[in-house]
Image (tube, rainbow, N blue to C red):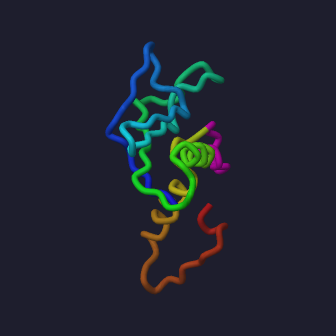
């Protein structure tokens, strides 16, 4: 289990593009940052319109180190099969929970909430 937040630390690279997608860095001893959105060498471009914000791992539980967690987080950004994007930059677990919360805001107290996945796709 991890707690993620947008990092206030930004990295810069020489050239006109932001850091490469997947860039991982440790700032100090306990401040890992990860770019889940950025320049993509395969496409030779940055597919975004804004300067990407890296994630930071604020808290973790378990035996995995920051580098292993970053690799897992990066993989989760490519798992959204509900769109055609190469990667969302947001892990699917977070993106999906946000979508579900948007839907549940519309549920009135007298309505029955269904838990099946098909109601939230």
Residue at left 46%, top 34%?
A: 25
Circle count: 0
Residue at left 56%, top 57%?
A: 63
Vertical placement of 59 versus 73: above or below? below
Numbered range of the magenta stretch: 77-86
Please identify the dominant SS of the magenta region.
loop
Q: Quadrant of residue 114?
A: bottom right
Q: Nearer the viewer, residue 28 or 9?
A: 28
In reply to whether residue 84 is colored magenta, the answer given is yes
Coordinates of residue 108 in the picture (x, y in percent)? 43, 79
Vertical placement of 74 versus 1: above or below? above
Coordinates of residue 68 in the picture (x, y in percent)? 58, 46
Q: Nearer the viewer, residue 14 or 64?
A: 64
The extreme top residue here reads 15
Residue at left 36%, top 32%?
A: 10
**Is 110 left or right of 41, judged from the image as shown?**
left
Coordinates of residue 43 in the picture (x, y in percent)? 63, 23
Vertical placement of 88 versus 113: above or below? above
**Is 83 left or right of 110, judged from the image as shown?**
right
Residue at left 44%, top 49%?
A: 57
Coordinates of residue 75 in the picture (x, y in percent)? 63, 45
In reply to whether residue 96 is colored magenta, the answer given is no
């Amino acid at each position: 289990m991890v707690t993620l937040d947008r990092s206030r630390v930004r990295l810069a690279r020489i050239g006109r593009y932001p850091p490469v997608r997947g860039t991982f860095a440790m700032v100090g001893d306990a401040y890992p940052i990860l770019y889940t959105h950025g320049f993509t060498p395969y496409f030779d471009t940055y597919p975004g319109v804004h300067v990407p914000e890296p994630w930071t791992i604020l808290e973790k539980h378990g035996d995995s180190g920051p580098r292993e967690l970053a690799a897992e987080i990066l993989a989760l950004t490519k798992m959204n099969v509900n769109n055609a994007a190469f990667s969302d930059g947001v892990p699917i677990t977070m993106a999906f929970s946000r979508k579900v919360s948007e839907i549940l805001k519309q549920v009135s107290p007298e309505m029955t909430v269904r838990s099946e996945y098909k109601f939230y796709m």
